[in-house]
Amino acid sequence: MADATQSSKERVRKFVIFFTFFLIIFTAAVQVFLVQREIGYIGLFLPPTLVFVSMTVINYWKCVKVDSSAKSAGKAPSIQTDGWRYCPYSGCSGSVPINSRHCHQCDICIIQRDHHCHFVAKCIGQNSLPFFMVLITSMFGLTLTYCSANLIYITTHETPGTLLLTVVAPIQVLWYFLGYVSLSHCLISLNIVISFTAFIGSIILNYHEYNLLFHNKPYLTKSMPIASSGVLKMSKLDRIREVFGKKWYKFYVDPTHQSTVQKQYGVTKVM
């Protein structure tokens, strides 16, 4: 039964990854070949589209591949030692780093666990967090580019009477199969809805993650000094360096930059 459940989870995970990649490529293709070419601003919107699509795809794949589980910390000691604790759940059943938390969906402890991301189909933790932060930043830039091009399309190609139907994608799909609208208009309608939804989602994600990083997320960065109130007692730059490393800026400008494993310290309390 356990093997069947694990196999089912793996199939779902592969489907989610495939679907996400398909959605990224699909929206990019519709934007470039339909929306941007139709409005005549392809020279303006194509460069940022290519840059942000590349950053999104690369960092998404790194989030998928990078391991932040307790296994990435190396061989666990057979007896209880400093910096380690015992996890009783079946996925671990042994010593794990003290700054890890168990994820019941992954069924393993994740070092400096941030959250379980359903779009990545795994947990975001110590080693994958830098890539996830760049991922949601690049998603914001990508969806902002899309929404800007879509806004120009709406103002130049739509009337108040057709606008409502354009942004209601399910109706457009139905009308396409009934022969009332063209395939290109149906795809553009889907792109507008997907882009706008992803834009709102990226704003929420960026605000949430960066706010927690800068202010009140001590379990993200366990080696940071934490006041008795739970607020991190470090500058914003130091908090960024704690998560990304000293060369934090490379994550945002160099897609090939690799994450470095951080030290496994306990929480330092500052009274």
Image (spheres, rainbow, N blue to C red):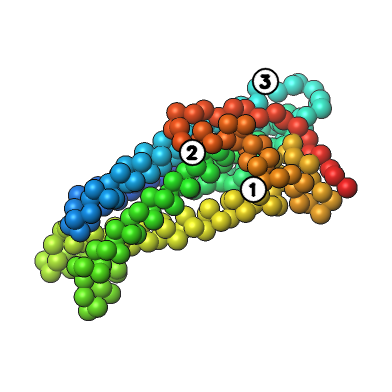
Q: Amino acid at mark 1?
A: Leu
Which residue does the image show at 64% across and 48% down from the upper left?
213
Depicted 195 relative to depicted 243: above or below: below
Give the residue furthest to the bottom: 161
Is residue 26 visible to us here?
Answer: no
Q: Is there CB contact under 8 Å for labels 2 and 3?
A: no
Is 39 left or right of 13, judged from the image as shown?
Answer: left
Q: Is there CB contact under 8 Å for labels 3 and 1?
A: no
Which residue does the image show at 48% across and 47% down from the upper left?
137
Label 1 Cα neighbours within 10 Å, binned few <14 / some 14-19 / many ≥20: some
> Where residue 148 sits: x, y (%)?
33, 59
Q: Which residue is mark 3?
A: 75
Which residue does the image show at 38% across and 44% down from the upper left?
52
Give the residue furthest to the left: 179
Which residue does the image show at 80% across and 23% down from the upper left?
79
**Which circle's residue, 2 or 3, is located before the other in the chain?**
3
Identify the mark at residue 252; answer none if there is no mark.
2
> Where residue 176 sits: x, y (%)?
16, 64
Q: Amino acid at mark 2?
A: Tyr
Nearest to the observer: residue 153 or residue 128: 153
Q: Amino acid at mark 3?
A: Lys
Is residue 161 visible to us here?
Answer: yes
> Where residue 65 sits: x, y (%)?
48, 32
Q: Which of pointers 2 and 1 indicates the residue nearer the eye?
A: 2
Identify the mark at residue 232; answer none if there is no mark.
none
Q: Which residue is mark 1?
A: 213
Secondary structure found at label 2: helix
Is 45 left or right of 129, judged from the image as shown?
Answer: left
Secondary structure found at label 1: helix
